[in-house]
Amino acid sequence: MIFTPGYDESESIESHQIVASENIVFSMGADRNKAPFPQYFVNGKAFSPDRLDFFAHPGEAREYVLINGNHNVHPFHIHVNRFQVIEMGSELSTEKYPVLKSVMDFEEGLWRDTVVVPPNGRARIWVKYGNYTGKTLFHCHFLAHEDTGMMSTLFIGEPDFTFSRWKVDNIDTAIMMCVGATVVVMGILFIVLFSGSTARKDYSSVSTMNDVRKKRGEENIAGTRESLSLLNVS
Ligand SMILES: [Cu+2]
């Protein structure tokens, strides 16, 4: 096993240290009504600096399966953090495409910051995050792909539940959020109105009872007066 100078073999990531495995899919769009053309995506989304796409805790190790459904290559590059390539594969045969041999050839366990994800293929990598927090990036290292969307944000640290995380980036999400908000508001209104009418009902029934008692009391008093007048007692 060959290691990059500066890294000790004991630093090598072991499978039991991996806390999660995530897919990172590189894809292209060919919508002629949109600029730029063609479009480049990571997990179906074009880059947005206002959105946090991936999360990790400092010090933990994660597996990423880099998937390339295109017929061209995407050199994956992650900022600040190094990784080890565990597996490489492609649906294309190296006999038919001899140039693929050099792409697929890799030194297992070698520390890297960039790996070429083979066409119609994948690369499985293990990342070990250092003890630092903040927002960083990974992207395709082809400038044309990177600059037209093939880039993602990565937040290292405790997930921050600010509104930036829930920023609406498409119409479907907006519609779902409106429906969700309406259901919540209707629910709150129903509870308020229902509990309000119950309170009024209880109050009115108490006042009705009081009225009845009052009337009965008056009748009794009147009845007593009648009885007393019959007895000539004033
Ligand atoms: Cu690319």
Image (spheres, helix red, strand yellow):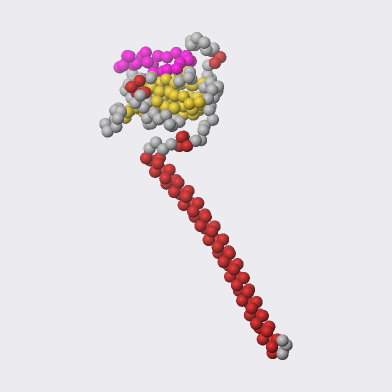
The C terminus lies in quadrant: bottom right
The x, y position of residue 101, in whole percent, is 36, 14
> In this orientation, which residue lies closer to the viewer: 207 or 56?
207
**Residue 219 lies in magenta, yes or no?**
no
**Residue 97 lies in magenta, yes or no?**
yes
Image point (46%, 34%), residue name = 164
Residue 69 appearing in the image: no
Horizontally, residue 189 falls left or right of residue 76, namely right
The x, y position of residue 21, in whole percent, is 48, 27
Q: Residue furthest front?
A: 234
Q: Is residue 50 above or below residue 231?
A: above
> In this orientation, which residue lies closer to the viewer: 212 or 123?
212
Give the quarter of the image for residue 145: top left
Image point (58%, 70%), residue name = 208
Residue 189 appearing in the image: yes
Q: Is residue 136 above or below residue 160?
A: above
The x, y position of residue 190, in whole percent, is 49, 55
Image point (41%, 38%), residue name = 168
Q: Is residue 165 above or below residue 128?
A: below
Image point (59%, 68%), residue name = 207
The x, y position of residue 39, in whole percent, is 32, 28
Horizontally, residue 192 falls left or right of residue 227, namely left
So how many labels did they put on this image?
Answer: 0
Horizontally, residue 36 falls left or right of residue 122, namely left
Give the quarter of the image for residue 90: top left
Q: Which residues are magenta?
A: 94-121
